[in-house]
Each structure stands twice: as C-alpha cells, then as structure tokens.
Image (cartoon, rainbow, N blue to C red):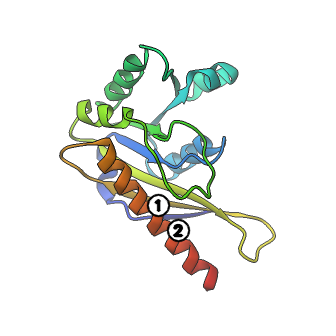
Amino acid sequence: MHINTLLPTDTMDKPILLIGNHISWWDGFIVQYINQKLWKKKFHFMMLEEQLKKHQFLNLTGGFSINKKSKEIIASLTYAQELLHTKNNLVLMFPQGKITSMHQQTMVFEKGIERILQHASDTIEVVFMVNIIDYFSDEKPTLYIYLTNYQTDKPNHKDIEKAFQDFYNSCLGTQQKRATE
C-alpha cells in the first residue's frame, strides 16, 4: 500500500468530508485504516440502505443509511451535515452512489454532495481520495491511495465533480509514469 498525500498539516483541526472513488466493497475499511494512520477521527460513512441491511454490523462501525428513492434522503444528508459540525468527525462519501469499475474514466456524482457542502460548517476540510490497484511486474497487487484537499466558496455538484475528475486524471497520469519506471 502506498499513500500519496498533498494534504495540509492542519486537517486535524477540522471535521473532514472525504470524497472517494468507489471501486470495491473494501473501500470503507481502507479509509478506516487511513483515518487511523493520519487523522484518528471518529469515522462515519454513508451507505445505501439495502446494503446496510445486508451487512448490519456496519451500523456499529459508523455506517448510516441513505435511500435515494425515499423522502428519507433529506434526513440522511442532514445527518451527514450535522456530523460535519464536530471537528473530531470524518464522514466518508462516494458521490457516484454505487461501486464502479476502477477502469471507469468518467466520474458522475449524485447531487447530495452539493447539499451537504452548502449546509455544512464552513470550517470543514474536503479531501479527495483516489484508489488505484496495479500489479506492474509484481506477483501481488499494490493499492495506491492519492489524497488532496479541495476548497470552494460556492459548492456546486458539477464543479466538485469536475475538480474530482481532474484529480482522478492526474492520479492516473502518475500511475502511468510509475509503469514506465
């Protein structure tokens, strides 16, 4: 595992909204590991209601549900906003709303991320995370984790989506350079 971070050192003083690409069922566990290594914050994550019902033990690890087809979606987004008012909290979101292939080139975000940022405390740290798995010439795969912060005054889900896409493309470029080394 390689963690490549471009984060400022003051992320400890603020609640963190971590936005990542969702490539596997293990992503939440990976973020928990990163949290223990870098921030040591109380970990929370948004998960589709039907998946959380299948894996109810995740309720005990910081999971909370969202149902995109219900009016309760507002309550889930409001809960995420409230969590981001406490500096010791880290909230993980995958704005694509589902697991997607690591090889998917374009990220499409749901609109909930915009609502959370518009109503969250203005003292939060927004962190982008990109996970890429590569073998190169090794027998076993290596997980490459890229982290950077994102700042905006007027959150808009399309602007956030584009900024994440730009970061994702940059990470892919770095991976391609690794392949030639």
**Crowding at label 2, few (<14), some or many (≥20) Cα neighbours within 10 Å?**
some
Crowding near the residue tagged with mark 1, few <14, some 14–19, many ≥20 C-alpha atoms within 10 Å: many
On the rendered structure, is 7 left or right of 130? Answer: left
Q: Is residue 34 above or below residue 95?
A: below
Residue 49 in picture, x, y percent from top left: 57, 21
What is the secondary structure assignment of the residue under circle 1? Answer: helix
Q: Give how far across and how far down residue 33 sits, in percent.
A: 57, 48
Residue 100: image tag = none
Find residue 81 and report its image quarter: top left
Q: Is residue 161 left or right of residue 171?
A: left
Residue 177 placement: quadrant:
bottom right
Q: In the image, residue 71 lies at what x, y percent?
A: 41, 13
Which residue occupies 59% across, 23% down? 60
Whether residue 79 is situated above or below residue 143 in the rendered picture: above
Where is residue 139? Give x, y as percent.
81, 70
| Quadrant in the rendering for residue 91 | top left
- Write down the residue under mark 1: 168
Q: Residue at x 44, y 68 (%)?
A: 170
Cβ atoms under marks 1 and 2 closer than 8 Å: yes
Report the front residue among 3 and 120.
120
Given the image, on which type of amino acid does mark 2 rest? Leu
Residue drawn at the location 38% of the way across and 49% of the way down: 161
Kindly identify which residue carries mark 2: 172
- Quadrant including the C terminus: bottom right
Report whether 76 appears left or right of 150. Answer: right
- Report the number of discs: 2
- Indicate the quadrant containing the N terminus: top left, top right, bottom left or bottom right: bottom right
Q: CA distance from mark 1 to mark 2?
A: 6 Å
